[in-house]
């Protein structure tokens, strides 16, 4: 048995971190409760369902490597379920540098997300400060459909988006190669500027 660790904060669909959330883990596509543990050796069982951490709002458990459905419930709140969620898949990454294009409303890291990827994080760092001649004040980071999927960034050198701006589970698996899109805020991109786009992902076994 290969035991893997799962640990993440539980957020509502509005992005709020909550405690007192009931977490249920089942084998993907079934109603069968998964065997959960509190330790990496798989010795001490953990109740399933269980309540997330009362201090940090995390769901923290160990489970045999595999694909699971995770659902979250708390009265008066809405959560995005993590369906066909592969626990134990190795994390991979792509890194792409995106130069500014004068007068552009959108800049793209073409096919930065490969087919079959479940995205765990997108981090964008300004490697060259963006010009503000076109009225640009910042940019949203998204997938071309949801423009603020992974938060936003300002235009200064070295400014970086962080995992805190990332709401996983909105679109858990990308079936086809997908670009990361930077959408201008307050104007258009000027001639100067460049950003490094890093995508952290796993290839999902459910595809």
Image (spheres, rainbow, N blue to C red):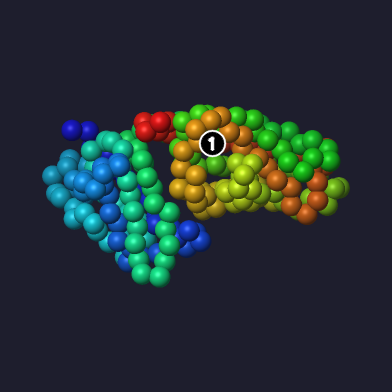
Assign the N terminus to one quadrant of the image.
top left
Q: Is residue 20 left or right of residue 196?
A: left
**Residue at 77% of width from left, 43% of height from top?**
105
Q: Could you tell me if residue 164 is visible in this image?
A: yes
With respect to residue 203, does 141 lie above or below?
Answer: below
Assign the C terminus to one quadrant of the image.
top left
Q: Nearer the viewer, residue 111 or 152?
A: 111
Residue 100: x and y in percent read: 76, 36
| Disc 1 crowd, CA 10 A, few/some/many (<14, 14-19, 20+) | many
Residue 142: x and y in percent read: 61, 45
**Residue at 78% of width from left, 54% of height from top?**
186
Q: Nearer the viewer, residue 146 or 154?
A: 146
Q: Is residue 25 left or right of residue 197?
A: left
Q: For residue 77, which quarter of the picture? A: bottom left
Q: Nearer the viewer, residue 196 or 121?
A: 121
**Residue at 70% of width from left, 49% of height from top?**
139
Q: Is residue 152 left or right of residue 87?
A: right
């Amino acid at each position: 048995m290969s035991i893997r660790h799962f640990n993440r904060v539980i957020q509502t669909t509005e992005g709020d971190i909550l405690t007192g959330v009931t977490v249920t883990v089942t084998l993907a596509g079934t109603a069968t409760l998964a065997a959960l543990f509190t330790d990496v050796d798989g010795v001490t069982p953990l109740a399933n369902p269980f309540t997330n951490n009362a201090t940090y709002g995390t769901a923290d458990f160990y489970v045999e490597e595999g694909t699971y459905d995770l659902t979250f419930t708390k009265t008066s709140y809405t959560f995005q379920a993590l369906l066909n969620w592969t626990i134990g898949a190795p994390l991979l990454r792509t890194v792409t540098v995106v130069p500014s294009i004068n007068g552009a409303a959108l800049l793209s890291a073409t096919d930065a997300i490969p087919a079959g990827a479940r995205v765990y994080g997108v981090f964008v760092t300004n490697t060259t400060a963006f010009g503000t001649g076109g009225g640009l004040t910042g940019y949203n980071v998204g997938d071309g459909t949801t423009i603020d999927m992974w938060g936003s960034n300002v235009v200064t050198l070295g400014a970086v988006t962080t995992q805190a701006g990332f709401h996983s589970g909105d679109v858990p698996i990308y079936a086809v190669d997908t670009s990361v899109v930077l959408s201008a805020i307050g104007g258009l991109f000027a001639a100067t500027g460049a950003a490094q786009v890093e995508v952290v992902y796993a290839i999902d076994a459910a595809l």
